[in-house]
Structures are given as C-alpha cells and as structure tokens.
Amino acid sequence: MTCRLGLNDFRRMKTENERIAMLTAYTAWQARLAEGAGAEMLLVGDSVGMVEHGLPDTLGVTLEMMILHCAAVSRGSEKAFLVGDMPFMSYEVDDREAIRNAGRLLQEGRVQSVKLEGGISRVETIRALVRAGIPVMGHVGLTPQTSIALGGFKVQGKDRAGARRVFEDAMAVAEAGAFALVLECVPALLAKVITERLSIPTIGIGAGLSCDGQVLVLHDVLDFYGAFRPKFVKVYAEGSSTINEGLTRYVNEVKMGLFPAEEHSFKMDPSVLEELE
Ligand code: KIV
C-alpha cells in the first residue's frame, strides 16, 4: 500500500517555498492521469456538476453525487492528497449536519479532507469540523455557490472595501483551523499579501503567481469544457479536438467497413460451423 501525502507535506512545502500543484478530478481515470502527471492534491470539486453532469451551475450538486465521485477518485489514485468539496446546503444549516456530511465524504468517499466556501460567516463550521478531526480547506474570494449573492462571477477584492473583506475572510478561515485556503478570482497583489501573511498554504485559481499552489479544473486544462473559458484558464492540451478526431475516425471506419480489421477479430476452426448447417 502506498502512503498518501499528508498535511505535514503541505506545511513543509509552504515553508520551503515548494509550489503545490492541484487539479480537479472526478473519476478514477482522471485521478490516475492527474496523479501520474505529478499533482500532489486532487480536488473533487463541485464543478463536477457543470463539467460532468451538464448542470448550469454548482447549486444542483448533491452530497450523494460528491460521495460517488470522491470514491471513484480515491480508487483511481494512490499518493495524492484528496479534497472533497462540500456541496451547496450540505454545511449551511447547522454544524452537526456539516460534521455528519463531511464525515460521509471521508468515510464513504475516502477523501482525506473537505473544502467549503466562505470566510467569516463559516468560521464556526470550520472550527466544528476541525474539532471533529476533519481537515478543512477554506475557499474565499469568488465563491461560486454564492455567486448570486456576490452579483455574478466577478473578481473579488479590487476596491478597498472588497480587498479588506477578502483579507479578513482569509485570516478568519486560517484562524479557525483550516489547513489550506483556495483564493479564487482575486487580484494577484491581494493574493500575495494574504499568502505572505498566512502560515497555511494558499492555492490560487485566478489569483496570480504568488500563491503557494495553483488549482485548475481538469476540463479547462484539457479543453474539454466548451461552455465558457474564464480569463485565468490556460489550455495545456487540445483535448476536445484530439478526441473528436479519434471518434470521427472510428465512426468513418465503421461506416466504410474498415473496422474491425482481422487483428481485432477472433478466429475459430471453420469445421465447427459444418455442424450448424
Ligand atoms: O469546484 C471546483 O472545481 C472548485 C475549484 C474551482 C477551486 O472549487
């Protein structure tokens, strides 16, 4: 049995200025590929609702969906540290429910930690989870589950009041005991100040180069998600066109009678068939 990376590894990486590479993964094959590429952390994000289930946003993602995807990612990986997203309304009602739901992600989904969105307003929940022995990754800045309240998918913390809000949220989440913090869609300068101030690692997505690590959605990195592409995304492989090319060749070969060829077919002794005639 290979040992997974743990919280001490990420503390050490922060201290030694070693950058953390994180990717989302939702299935066993994606986990295998992301881990194989060297990602130390895999996030089973609630973005699964949009990129795998075709939902318009993350609000429709349920705990059962998350458990299923977490378990698949756990089976497909050996070494990476796994973070399971707590879906909308799985931690807001009260702390007991949050502990029960986070516990299911660990027990049934076999992830090592959970992520939840929100800053000062989530401090008590983070404390309760940490007290229960559940490692928590925070997530501040643009929080997609509350994007309606934030006025849409907008960069957070650009003006004085906004910057103070994101800064105080980040400090509060760390103070509450989170082991790491996602900073989403905040100006690079603000992310730098927060990263320098915190002793826990920051993981940026649209937050510039000064964060201790970076996370991107796998489907964005591989250009699998056609709906829209945020400014902070960099495409590293033209997945859609490569796959499309392969699938089109398959369809064409079927239509033209070129597939299956002899090497894809099974042989038998023709005399066996005499008995059938
Ligand atoms: O769900 C997700 O993929 C996320 C990342 C964008 C950080 O929360």
Image: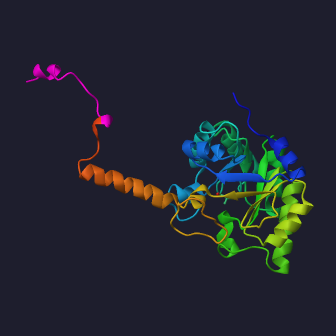
Q: Count the marks.
A: 0
**Who is closer to the viewer here, 160 or 264?**
264
In the rendered image, which quarter is residue 183 located in? bottom right
Q: What range of the chain is rendered magenta?
A: 263-277
In the image, is residue 129 above or below residue 234?
above
Quadrant in which the C terminus appears? top left
In the rendered image, which quarter is residue 166 located in? bottom right
Q: Is residue 58 above or below residue 40?
A: below
Q: Is residue 188 visible?
A: yes
Question: In which quadrant of the rendered view does residue 1 lie?
Answer: top right
- Residue 274 forms part of the magenta stretch: yes
123 left or right, relative to 228? right
Residue at horizontal 67%, vertical 68%?
232
Q: In x, y percent, where is residue 216?
A: 66, 59
Q: Residue at x 76, y 70 (%)?
A: 186
Q: Is residue 86 at least partly visible in the picture?
A: no
Left or right side of 189 for 27: left
Q: Position of residue 144 (x, y in %)?
A: 66, 65
Residue 140, percent across and down? 77, 63
Magenta span has 62? no
Name the residue: 59% across, 39% down: 76
Question: Magenta: predominant secondary structure element?
Answer: loop
Answer above or below: position of 163 versus 241: below
Quadrant of the image where one finds ligand 1: bottom right
Judge from the rendering whether residue 74 lies leftward or rightward of residue 119; answer left or right: left
- Is 65 left, or right, of 84 in this rendering? left
- Judging depth in this view, the residue of 213 and 94 nearest the camera is 213
Q: Tell me where residue 251 appears, x and y as whole percent.
A: 31, 53
Coloring scheme used = rainbow
Single out the residue that lies furthest toward the bottom. 159
Q: Residue furthest left?
A: 277
